[in-house]
Image (cartoon, coloured by chain):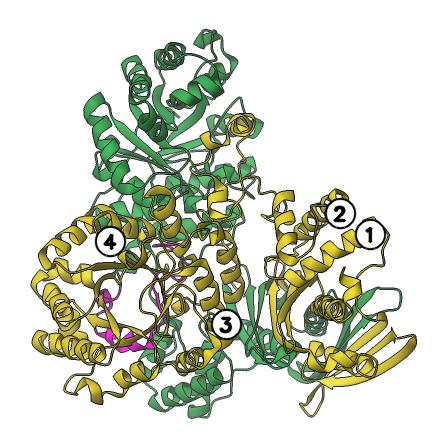
Chain colours: A green, B yellow
């Protein structure tokens, strides 16, 4: 692995899309990547086509050392990206080649090294406790040593913007030390994340003019401006942008790779990815959220599932006329999809459009369309909401079509006779939930009882116990999320309850809804729809 | 309610911090405010000190009509903010005074009206299907009619930036029509959210110079730049900024009120809130997330629980030397905390302060204070949250004080022996919930059974039946709200449940919390705290 430049992107080495998910992103509270996770993340990023993947800090973090060793041993074959090791300049008073931390960077065999150095005089004197001369010597020596060993070197100038504002001369001296010693890019880091775009752009422009060096940018999101700051820096002349997937990072996080890339491609017209790469943004964003085990942000710019979701019924008919009047870009450009949300204002136009999206042809069946509109309105008046429950909405549409055609309705794969749930807070303080269901499935009457840690959990367990011997596919289906919303306020515990159930199998996730004054019955209704939807996919003749 | 200007802020009417959580924020997928929720949101925003609160679209949405009616009837007493009704200009071919939608704006009695108008010629011709002359007349007539009726009027110029880029003359004509007819502010809306800060700032500056009008800004977050764009607009001369709490809104959302305010106050040095307001940002952000029933974004700039959390081992010791070298602002400025371990409540100082607010003297009892800190930390690690449940927190504090003084603990006014809840979905389809409680109250053992329309309702009914003969004050107490949040995702129905119960009597409302894997037990815990809190007030010797 000796690539030191991006491969296969139209802009080549002229522009660096640099990812640091595996190092700076891993600082986010709650993220803990295994080495296998790190390899998987790197493969996704390379497939997307980023130019540089910072894999971690070899020598400082054992997992990172192992990651680079396994990458060098052939477990990571990168098509587009160059692999980068992150590390610090030599310690004070030690030759770079004698500093074990610097040697670990060499040992990692990463062809590119990003060195972090302090550029704020207050950090140099108070935290590092050296003078500016020694700080600059530490930078120059380490850069020289690593370039002498054949590495390409970038410099992360930590706390640059705060340092430059406080004492510009020191900040520029550190950059010059790196540049003169052979660093290819000096990266201005807004380490504390306090910058705003207009001021940051001015600084980038000024520093570029004063140093003549190639400028990179690294932004944190503490003012909620990390993406904007990164883009403003590029507009001011930076040609190297450091990001993390989904903005993962310490505190408020880093600049989100997907929003930055979306903006570079769609707004600034820069071909920073290989051909076809932009259309992978949504998929890769979700895959990396999976690996990080963090629920995707549904409202994330460009790649969120709501990023192109339109709620206002008001606009639905106009959207049909010209979707681009209501979207800032064509969602397909970033691999996302326009969704129409069904809300209180549901009209024929938006339901027809929604049907199209779900693969249900309501346009060809005006009676079913009209019945669906009435049904949805009635249900929504009663507290139902199909906005987040596509699977229930699809079932409702298919039931209306089946009804209007005299076909068999699309129901759950069993018939309920009755259920009972008993909750005991016993004298000894123990709390027990037990459910019994009586159902008819595959021609048999089945009774099953199970316990759970709550009423709905017990009911779900009992139903599964009853159905499992008869429905082979039940094993691969599981409940992945469960949400409860109490609807009518000011009525105390007598309010109506809306339950959303998200189910998943190996291939997909689907969400169903149930509403009832009784939370257990509301959950039951959502569970039944979840099973009906799965059954429909398993026996496709029912969905035609 | 006739205020048309912000009150009590140093900048007064010179700068407008304008909140549209209740209208544009409510467009977010999953948000469905009740009228009571809307009133509660407005009260929080007013306490924070925003200048304008847009309450909704009276006439178009029945809930919004009711909101304005109840506000006008005295349910909403605003100290700082002016109340705003949102609506559309008159329809084509109808006099403004004859348009029922315009009349509904008057009927709402809101002293300020924000009118939305199309300013992109493509939307005017293709969606509105009128010519530019008529579009301008619709704006001018409606503004004139409403100002003639004594209203202060702002104009939201929809799709302004796209329209201005495509056909600047039409866009400016619409603004001029509004300005000449008496609109006080013309708000440039990035409705599709496609702008970036540098370009947007140039446009704002140019439009301000060309029109001479007072400029407002309204940004959507589709490029992840809504906050940055709003700030850039202010730097370019806008003096009216429209935001939503936590950035709630359609698609990727709107500009986040808390990040925008944080930036205005901390970065631009603008006193946009009344004295002390900034320190309420974190608290209000979390309270509004509770009301929206959306989990707070832990990584939100300024107000997120991780916004000032430091994980990087690199910095840990240096932070002790000088925290401000590692934070972009002092977190206390926005009511946040650097050492966020589990929560922001977990510090001694903040709990002591909170105790003061609740009338509990923890400062004079260091042992109780220290025990309270530990208890709160432990509970919050298990999913409890006292942010929205002051009554439970007060009980917890008083219990720790009682414990450390050897006094009798502050418990509910009865002892539970056991309860049982039975839920039947019967063969005939009827659903029955029945609860039996066995309690000891006033020296007697009481058994009571009651039905309800759900498990918690039945349990509440049975408990009331058991206690009523012994506790005269129970009659005047009622449950006014009930909220459920499922906490740990990715575990299906087995997740932990947090229940918030709001109770009220003739004088006040108080909120209690319960957490358990079993939703009924979680509700039970919150109900018990609700009764304990009422009992404490009725028998004041217990609260001393």
Which residue position holds label 1?
A: B403
Q: CA distance from mark 1 to mark 2?
A: 8 Å
- Of circles 2 and 4, the one toward us is 2
Q: Nearer the viewer, mark 3 or mark 1?
A: 1
Above or below residue A332? Residue A345 is below
Q: Are marks 3 and 1 on the same chain?
A: yes
Residue segment shown in magenta: A300-326
Q: Is residue A233 visible?
A: no
* Contact (Cβ within 8 Å) of mark 1 with mark 2: yes
Residue ID at (33%, 56%): B221
Q: Which residue is mark 4?
A: B195
In terms of image quadrants, where is residue A333?
Answer: bottom left
Q: Is residue B449 left or right of residue B36?
A: right
- Which chain contains the residue that carries disc 2? B
- Name the foreground residue: B60 vs A404: B60
Q: CA distance from mark 3 to mark 1?
A: 37 Å
Residue wearing tag 3: B37
Q: Secondary structure at mark 2?
A: helix
Q: Residues within 10 Å of mark 1 (few under 14, many from 20)?
A: some
Does B203 appear above or below B99? above
Placement of B221 over or under A140, stated as above or below = below
Q: Which one is earlier in the sequence, the residue at label 2 or at label 4?
A: 4
Instruction: Indicate the chain on which mark 1 is placed.
Output: B
């Amino acid at each position: 692995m000796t690539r030191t430049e991006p491969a296969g992107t139209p802009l080549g080495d002229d522009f660096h899309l640099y990812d640091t998910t595996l190092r700076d992103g891993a600082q986010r509270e709650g993220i803990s990547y295994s080495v296998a996770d790190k390899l998987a993340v790197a493969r996704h990023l390379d497939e997307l086509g980023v130019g540089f993947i910072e894999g971690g800090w070899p020598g400082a973090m054992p997992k990172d050392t192992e990651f680079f060793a396994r990458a060098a041993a052939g477990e990571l074959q990168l098509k587009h990206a160059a692999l980068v090791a992150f590390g610090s300049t030599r310690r004070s008073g030690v030759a770079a080649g004698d500093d074990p931390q610097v040697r670990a960077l060499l040992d990692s065999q990463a062809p590119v090294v990003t060195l972090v150095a302090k550029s704020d005089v207050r950090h140099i004197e108070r935290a590092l406790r050296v003078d500016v001369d020694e700080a600059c010597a530490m930078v120059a020596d380490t850069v020289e040593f690593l370039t002498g060993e054949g590495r390409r070197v970038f410099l992360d100038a930590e706390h640059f913007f705060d340092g430059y504002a406080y004492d510009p001369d020191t900040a520029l001296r550190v950059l010059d030390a790196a540049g003169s010693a052979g660093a290819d890019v000096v990266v201005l880091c807004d380490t504390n994340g306090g910058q705003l775009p207009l001021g940051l752009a001015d600084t980038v422009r000024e520093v570029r003019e004063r140093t003549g060096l190639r400028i990179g940018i690294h932004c944190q999101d503490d003012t909620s401006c990390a993406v904007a700051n990164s883009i403003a820096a590029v507009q001011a002349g930076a040609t190297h942008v450091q990001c993390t997937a989904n903005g993962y990072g310490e505190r408020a996080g880093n600049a989100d790779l997907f929003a930055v890339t979306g903006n570079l491609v769609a707004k600034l017209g820069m071909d920073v990815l290989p051909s076809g790469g932009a259309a992978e943004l949504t998929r890769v964003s979700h895959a990396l959220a999976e690996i990080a085990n963090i629920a995707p942000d549904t409202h994330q710019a460009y790649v969120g599932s709501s990023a192109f979701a339109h709620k206002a019924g008001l606009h639905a008919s106009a959207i049909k006329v010209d979707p681009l009047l209501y979207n800032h870009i064509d969602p397909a450009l970033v691999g996302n999809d326009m969704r129409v949300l069904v809300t209180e204002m549901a009209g024929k136009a938006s339901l027809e459009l929604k049907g199209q999206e779900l693969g249900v042809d309501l346009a060809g069946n005006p009676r079913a369309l009209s019945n669906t509109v009435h049904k949805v309105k009635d249900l929504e008046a009663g507290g139902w909401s199909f906005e987040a429950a596509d699977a229930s909405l699809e079932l409702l549409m298919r039931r209306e079509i089946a009804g209007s055609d005299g076909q068999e309705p699309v129901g759950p794969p069993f018939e309920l006779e009755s259920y009972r749930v008993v909750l005991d807070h016993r004298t000894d303080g123990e709390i027990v939930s037990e459910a019994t269901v009586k159902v008819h499935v595959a021609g048999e009457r089945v009774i099953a009882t199970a316990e759970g840690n709550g009423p709905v959990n017990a009911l779900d367990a009992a139903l599964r116990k009853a159905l499992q011997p008869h429905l082979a596919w039940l094993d691969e289906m599981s409940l992945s999320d469960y949400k409860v919303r109490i609807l009518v306020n000011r009525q105390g515990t007598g309010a109506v309850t809306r339950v959303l159930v998200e189910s998943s199998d190996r291939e997909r996730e689907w969400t169903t809804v149930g509403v009832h004054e009784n939370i257990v019955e509301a959950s039951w209704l959502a569970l039944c729809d979840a099973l009906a939807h799965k059954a429909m996919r398993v026996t496709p003749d029912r969905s035609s």
